[in-house]
Image: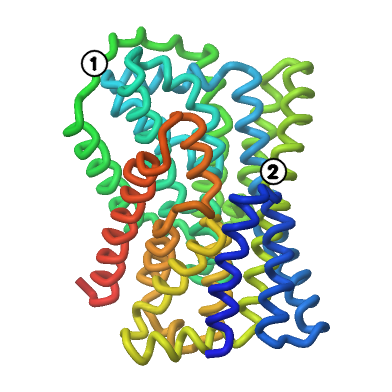
Amino acid sequence: METLIPFAVAIVVITVASLRYHLPPFLTLVGTSVLFGALAGMPAETLIAAITGGAGRIFSILGIVIFCGVGIAQVLRESGRIENIVADIRGLVHRPLATAGSAGYLLSVPLMCGITSFVILAPIITHLQPDRQASKILLYCAGVAGMISYVLLYPPPVVYSTITTLGLFAGRPWEVDLVTLPVSLLLLAGLLVALRARGTPAALPAEPAPIAGGRHLLAWLPFLVIVFALVVGSFVPPLHALANINLALLAGLFAALLTVPADVREKALARGTKNAGIIIFDLAGAGALGGVIAASTFPADVAALVQGYLPITLLPFVVAALVQAAQGSRVVTATVTATILATIPAALAINPLALVLMISAGAFMFSYVSDPFFWLLKRTTGDDFPAVVRNYTLPLSVAGIVTLVAALAVQAGL
């Protein structure tokens, strides 16, 4: 059990470094990796190899995915096409609450980042409702809805990292959505009902139907290309390579770039590359921490602790929740947890679908001070600390519990 105390120290250090000293996540996480390894008694050679290997693994898994997702988002922002997407959604869903929730839920999937989709949508959502308090509810709705699809659906990085690291659903990874999609829609519906009970904003005036072939179609083109590539690659054997999410997203990015003027393209690539680099470095830093944790005796210590008090089937959820509390990134939670579980044969005997759901459930939990989205919501809404906990942390924790129940049902064969 000698690594449990260093792990607790790591959580405290990350929290203090982030809140008190505002250090960048990459520096905080890599520094904490060194501290954890030293406290856990790891040899220097093993520690350095774990840090570089963990960071490199994250880049190999998510480098192209993040770059393309952020690139598409930046093209849509610079060209003003996000407004067209929201207008299309408003044309189908006339209530502000449902519009905010649907937009957040849908955009976080092709953009591969719940935070990125929120940043893009926030300025638009705030204009859906003139009342300040009602506008805050819409922002929380979009933020939580985006996290629901981001954490539960394939191909966004959370589920993608889990199944890639553990080698699950080889050749047909989209099959996971047959269960995770209904679960995510159930959670979205529950969110909308709960927020509506707090006060229903007035219905929006209907949007005029978009003109076919115009800017509205161009706004959706990158996503249509991505979906087309994944479908063709999955069902046409000679073109199976297209089912690779890296190639599909590259195709989507090129589709976005080719439909905008040169000045927009240059500006989007410049800003998108900068933003993608920051995200990738932060994730690589967390990957370094995950690599060190996985290389230590922490997996065995946690397994021994859980087996003494809880069924082994709960191990993925417990580990994911602990990792999420430590560093806040859901992608890193999935990658670190999967890396740890890969060293525990008993955990790999769990139903693969239940395993994915349990890790996602843990990634929903404890979205608190170590979560960068927590602070983004606080800044955007202007709310105090308890309000963000009540409107963001608690709803996601409820989503985690519901997802855990679904995982246990799958494991039990229900």
Residue 362 lies, with reference to residue 99, above or below; the image says below
x, y percentage for residue 214?
Answer: 53, 12
Q: In the displayed orientation, state which residue is furthest to the right.
A: 45
Q: Which residue matches tag 2?
A: 67
x, y percentage for residue 393?
Answer: 38, 49
Nearer to me, 139 or 147? 139
Residue 226 vs residue 90: left or right?
right
Residue 240 lies, with reference to residue 149, above or below; the image says below
Q: Which residue matches tag 1?
A: 203
Element carrying mark 1: loop
Nearer to me, 113 or 37? 37
Q: Nearer the viewer, mark 2 or mark 1?
A: 1
Residue 14 vs residue 270: left or right?
left
Which badge, 2 or 1, is on the more N-terminal residue? 2
Residue 319 vs residue 387: left or right?
right
Q: Residues within 10 Å of mark 2 (few under 14, many from 20)?
A: many
Element carrying mark 2: helix
Q: In the displayed orientation, state which residue is furthest to the front.
A: 20
Q: Could you say which quadrant of the image residue 314 lies in?
A: bottom left
Residue 384 lies, with reference to residue 349, above or below; the image says above
| Scheme of image coloration | rainbow
The CA span between labels 2 and 1 is: 37 Å
Q: Is residue 176 visible?
A: no
x, y percentage for residue 208?
Answer: 36, 7
Q: Residues within 10 Å of mark 1 (few under 14, many from 20)?
A: some
